[in-house]
Amino acid sequence: MLVLARLQFAITAIAHFLFVALTLGLVTYLVVMQTRWAITGKEAHRRQTRFWGQLYVINYALGIGTGIVMEFQFGLTWSGLTHFVGNVFGAPLAIETLVAFFAESTLLGLWIFGWNRMGRVTHTVMLWLVALTAYSSVFFVLTANGFLNHPVGYEMKDGEARLTDFTALLTNSNALSAAFHILAAAVVTGSFFIIAVSAWHLRKRTGHDEFFWSSMKLALPLTPVFILVTASLGGLQIGHSVKQTPTKYGERSDRAQDMVETFTQKFGPDNYFPPGFSQTAEFVMIIPALFMMLIAVIGVLFMIKRNLIRRKVLLWLLTAALVLPYVSNISGWIFREVGRQPWAVYGLLKTEDAVTPGLGYGTVLTSLLVFGTLVVVLLVVDWALLLRFARRGPDGSHLGRTPGETSAEAPDLPDLPQQASARSSASSSAPTF
């Protein structure tokens, strides 16, 4: 039953993180795109914001469902955790709900429906606020998660953890280092998403060469920088983690055996080292990052004199590379969470004691099947819609459409490249590629 409960939370948490990584990455680039439009007033920047903004809204809307499902489990299968540390753990989660679900969604609604109704500056400010509330949401979630990995700012009273120092909770080095690392990784994910879609259109010659070349010029040169930043912040996070959760690193940590002896004296004999696949996850996290750096650097080098446009193999590789940041993100999250085992709250509460008392095998299996199916359906629908609207290009954008503006529905998608290429050839005497 414990295995099923953990598997259920792992599936929903990973699924939700897939949405979050892209949402955070895209909104960062959207802020840049729309700010350029607000300053220059150029229609090219407006079209760019509308196209990528529509993909962002799709991912954001469907990701909400996975977040609700994930938090629902705290009351269903993990009430032992909420009773033990709810006074501490619940505070940042409550703030996150108010900030993310209410403030961020309200501001996003104003941004979505404020096209052609607000001034450029006011409308851009709305998007800046959406991004800031999204970042703060990550901070408060990682504040709660950081407490599970490195408990601070609390005291034990009547068998429960009580919050005594909210400042210590907010400044937990375990949480701060993880938050910055995850935000940087999310920007890398957004970068590769923009690069992948742009590379597909450039390779297929869909007739929007300048549009997607402009998007490529924005994302690709910054990608190696963000990968280096992510790796550096990851190293900083490991520096804190080795001291705070030494058993996660096994024999690589000098303090691990001492910590095991301490746990044994306090809680009795047990296996206080995490499963071996947590170390594998750490390795899997690093390998895709190396490939991402290699591909991004090669892509930047071929951008000189637009040589990249003529390299179809490289464009195909840039499209396929979209899977790499997701593999790295998931592996990193598995390493962080599984590496904490067998603890739900490191050094305080074992995972087996965090499960809801009296919870039946059938109940957990049923919720696993229901929630698992739900998040899989949301993921499939999300990527189906992203693929559909990404392939349509900027002319198929519904977001921010002005009154009387028509949208290219493109019912026959497989013929898009040939039709667009023919239009491009007919309208220009000089070849684009």
Image (cartoon, rainbow, N blue to C red):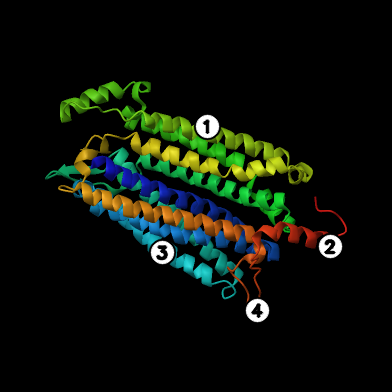
- Mark 4 / mark 2, whichever is N-terminal: 4
**Quadrant of the image occupied by residue 321:** top right
Q: Nearer the viewer, residue 138 or 355?
A: 355
Mark 4 / mark 3, whichever is N-terminal: 3
Residue occupying image coordinates x 40% and y 42%: 176
Q: Nearer the viewer, mark 4 or mark 3?
A: 4
- Residue ID for mark 3: 103
Give the image location of residue 331, x and y in percent.
44, 37
Dot 1, how many residues are within 10 Å of its Cα: few (below 14), some (14-19), or many (20+)?
few
Asked if residue 244 shows in the view, the reply is: yes
Which residue was labeled with disc 2? 426
Instruction: Confirm whether residue 152 shows in the render.
Output: no
> Disc 1 and disc 4: Cα gap in Å?
50 Å
Judged from the image, the secondary structure of the residue bearing numbered disc 3 is helix
Label 2: element kind? helix
Task: Identify the residue at horizontal 66%, vertical 50% (top origin).
Answer: 200
Three-letter amino acid code at the position of disc 3: Ala
Q: Which residue is mark 4?
A: 404
Asked if labels 2 and 1 touch by Cβ distance under 8 angstroms, the answer is no
Q: Which dot, 4 or 2, sits closer to the camera?
A: 2
Q: Nearer the viewer, residue 121 or 420?
A: 420
The residue lying furthest to the bottom in this view is 404
Decide if residue 240 is on the left or right side of residue 314.
Answer: left
SS class, disc 1: helix
| Distance (Cα) linking label 1 and label 2 | 46 Å
Type of amino acid at the residue the image marks with label 2: Ala
